Amino acid sequence: MTVRRGKKLSISIQEHMAIDVCPGPIRPIRQISAYFPRRSPTSPGPASPNPASSPLALSPGFGASGTGGAHLLSPLLAHGRPGGGGSLSLTSSVDTSVEINSSDSDDCTALGTLEFELRYERSASELHCTMLRAKGLKSMDFNGLSDPYVKLHLLPGACKANKLKTKTIRNSLNPVWNETLIYIGITEEDMHRKTLRLTVCDEDKLTHNELIGESRVPLKRVKPDQTKRFHTCLEHPPPLPSPTTMGEALRGISCYLREWENEQLHSLEERGRLLLSLQFLPPLSLEETEEEGGGGGGGGGGGEGRRSGGLCVGVKRCAHLAAMDVNGFSDPYVKIYLKPDLQKKSKHKTLVMKKTLNPEFNEEFFYEISLSELSNKTLEVTVWDYDLGRSNDFIGGVCLSGRSQGDGLRHWTDCLRNQGRRVERWHILTNQLPRGVRHD
């Protein structure tokens, strides 16, 4: 395209976005860095272009017609041309683009950093999360400051059930918390498959709290009984795929993947933790019965039951239960069955704990049964939310038997192999209702 004298130069928006912003010929730009030409560090000095003296030929053969406007060529075209001191080489142009892109995509300076410590106590099944400090947080308020706090979640799982929160530091971009939050009932299996999400938010009293940034740490990086310190950069949460932003061909695939992810999350939904103790008491001899006076019932079994032996089930406590009521709490209680139960006499219930997600029961129940019969039984433990005047809500449950898997199988076999010893273990409550459980 050439421009004749006497005619006004008109360039479309497409051509304008494809040409160099500096005076010179119209050339396609292949890199965004060419919009911002810089002089080479080895250049003797900036050359001031004179548009009036340079020809206004815009044809593609301009480079061969003369050398008067050689210093006005784009950096990509001037590479290797002698005398082009005022132009950038291809290498320097690429280096410049890398520097610009890396600085623009650096979320560390934009959102801030977070420093914290993690320690897993294997004997107590506890995860200690110590929030130390944050630096250079993004300002979220009109005064140029923020009111930051940290929320913790264990993924995957029920977010409301396992959410922990620190105190709020007012008007600070460099808050110091020095606060330890403890997760109870964390097993070694959880440490291998769980991820800890740390979210830094700005608290607003009149409006919704705003998200500043988050960081995710796989718990498998933490070794048992060792404290590990982390210094991470806050990042934006990963965007959720939206079918409306995709093409027609990908829209159906996106919907299918979203439904599949929802089914996976629903099947793996956790409703909290339950601490159970199992102890099989072997039958006592006549002499041992007389010494104990027939009173060693193991939690309410009576002298006759203790003399024949049986299973003692201890319901200790629950942790991080799912909230089933509108007030954000639950009124939990525990029911246990030893099945198959033809005579309908194996049901036991604990007391109801009002308005709590971390109840402590400390109740024991005794089943008079022999070891050979117990090996063919299944212990069903379910946690319910008590509702006055309507059916109770199912929170979660777990089954222990020789046909179970994971922690349930290990707990059951340890109890049968170690007669007379009390075996405690944490169990994950799932949202799957065991077969035959009735709503009452």
Image (cartoon, rainbow, N blue to C red):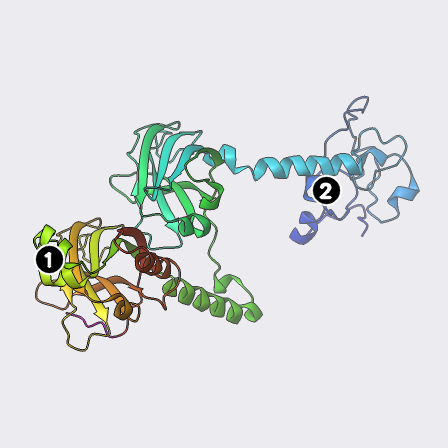
Magenta stretch: includes residue 49: no
Quarter of the image for residue 204 reads top left
Residue situated in front as seen by the camera: 55 or 394: 394
The residue labelled by disc 2 is: 20
Residue situated in front as seen by the camera: 408 or 22: 408
Could you say where residue 211 lies in the image, as x and y percent from the top left? 38, 43
Residue 170 horizontal side relative to residue 30, left or right: left
Res 147 seen here: no
Q: Main secondary structure of the magenta part?
A: loop
Secondary structure under tag 1 reads loop
- The span shown in magenta is 436-440
Can you say whether 39 is above or below 18 in the image?
above
Residue at 47% in and 45% down: 220
The residue labelled by disc 1 is: 300
Magenta stretch: includes residue 439: yes
Q: Amino acid at mark 2?
A: Asp
Could you say where residue 359 lies in the image, as x and y percent from the top left? 19, 49
Could you say where residue 342 lies in the image, as x and y percent from the top left? 18, 78
Can you say whether 65 is above or below 383 in the image?
above
Give the spatial CA distance, label 1 vs label 2: 89 Å
Quarter of the image for residue 391 reads bottom left
Res 326 seen here: yes
The total of numbered circles placed on residues is: 2
Question: Quick one: label 1 or label 2, which is nearer the N terminus?
Answer: 2
Q: Amino acid at mark 1?
A: Gly
Can you say whether 389 is above or below 139 in the image?
below
Label 2 packing within 10 angstroms: few (<14), some (14-19), many (20+): many
